[in-house]
Image (cartoon, rainbow, N blue to C red):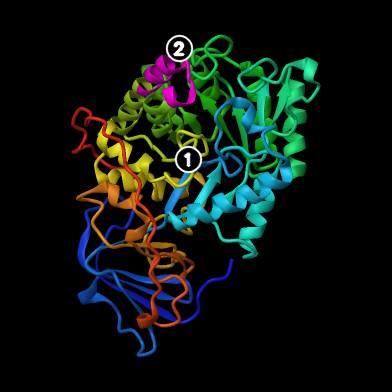
Amino acid sequence: MKTATGTTVIERGQLVDGTGASAVPDSAVLIRDGRIAYAGPAACAPQAPPDAVRIDARGGTIMPGLVEAHFHPTYFDVAELVDLDIKYPVEFVTLLAAANARLALECGYTAARSGGSLFNIDVWLKKAIEEELTPGPRLAASGREICGAGGLMDWNPDFRKIGMEGLVLLINGADEGRRAVRKLVKDGVEWVKTYPTGDAAAPDTNDHHTLCMTFEEMHAVVAEAHNHRLKVTGHCRATEGIKNALRAGYDTLEHGTFMDAEALDMLLARDTPVIPALQFEYASIERGPEFGMSQAVIDGHQETLEGGAESARMILRAGGRVGLGGDYGFAWNPHGDYAKEISFFVNYVGFTPLLAIRAATKTGAEIMGRAAEFGTLAAGKLADVLVVDGDPLADIRVLEDRSRFIAVMQGGVIKAGRRAGADTEAGARERAVGASDGPNGSPAADLRAAAGR
């Protein structure tokens, strides 16, 4: 991905650097050749050359580009499980994935980690983005997922003879787990996504307290993946599934829903990040009836929401790491609503805006293994920057409104926002798009003074 040349100055805004530190008023960010040269009070900023491009933050906020830590580029308008693998031909899904990537970038997400993809579309999508064939976030690919046979992701009945190979590799035993990882190595993935547990979506077979992989299978997957320098994550809701994942050496946990004290101690000892993905649960409860969701499934999502929110609070209080991202692409939780996850963690879970932004920037970059490159605004890092006409610390839902984005930058290049496509400062092109409503959940118990990492 190309970086900008020359000098750009972003000025007249407060600086929220992504570390969780307090905002710095009247700040400036100086960018040279696509990297941050200075970020801090405008009064202390180095002198910029006369030909520098200047971006006026209009009294708003200068912050890091957001990181979607659980991105499903191939999901689109999913209303039932079979929509995930047989709704559209792979050729069309590839085009949908490119459209979803572009949308994510327009929503301020300059980086994303895939949480699973039909075939290995995300591997090639990453290549297309890096070669600037299509716009999108800096991407970490995971390709097809791994699940035990008969588990949550094994829903196509045998008599149809269509299998699950396009979406998930089904395994029986440790040896098949190793073989599945080796297939993914050949596909070119960076992350191996697994399904240690079930979900509320399958209350009659693999609910959220059910295990879908054995510890031996999970350990074999981790050993083989780490041997090939890949990282491993897993859909972990059931308490014992969380513990098995931590014992096996998982690099992150998706959801981490039903944690107990022992699981929390294990998590902290390993410093393993968790991506709870709670807005999906809220949306399932609120909008599930519109899509024919059974009461049993909705009740399961309610239990999952409450358990996941409490687990997130436990992790925050204890000083652990939480990343933000969710299962966007379902009919009731569509692509483009990514920032609702940030709002949800402020309005329902109880994170402060600064801590929620840190989770959506710094921690996301750490999860991707690229914290040295982006995620915070600091000298030497890539200039992946979001300039917002507003104050997300006063109203976090500003981040849901793309019409408020002055600039979305990758490597100092403006890719989206009002300034996208502008040849000069005065020639900025306005791009007004609709805002989306956020959740109306009640605030959780006060965590506003929680210590940050």
- Residue, x 36% and y 42% (percent of image)? 340
Q: Classify 426 as above or below 379.
A: below
Which sits in the foreground, 348 or 368? 348
75 with respect to 266 (left or right)? right
Amino acid type, label 2: Ala
Q: Can residue 445 be seen at all in this image of the molecule?
A: yes
Q: Where is residue 113 in the image (x, y as percent from the top left)?
A: 54, 45
Residue 293 among magenta residues = yes
Look at mark 2 in the image and give the residue it sits on.
296
Residue 245 among magenta residues = no
Q: Mark 1, residues whose alpha carbon is within 10 Å: few (<14), some, or many (≥20)?
A: some
Look at mark 1 in the image and give the residue it sits on.
334
Q: Classify 307 as above or below 440.
A: above
Q: Classify 422 as above or below 126.
A: below
Looking at the rendering, in which quadrant would you find the C terminus? Answer: top left
For marks 1 and 2 on the same chain, the one whose residue lies earlier in the sequence: 2
Splitting the image into 4 quarters, where does residue 380 fall?
Answer: bottom left
Q: Main secondary structure of the magenta part?
A: helix
Q: Classify 414 as above or below 392.
A: below
What is the total number of numbered labels drawn onto the structure image?
A: 2
- Residue, x 51% and y 49% (percent of image)? 112
Splitting the image into 4 quarters, where does residue 187 fall?
Answer: top right
- Residue, x 30% and y 30% (percent of image)? 318
Looking at the rendering, the stretch of residues picked out in magenta corresponds to 288-305
Q: Position of residue 266 (x, y in %)?
A: 44, 24
Q: Position of residue 134 (x, y in %)?
A: 61, 61
SS under mark 1: loop
Amino acid type, label 1: Pro
- Residue, x 77% and y 22% (percent of image)? 175
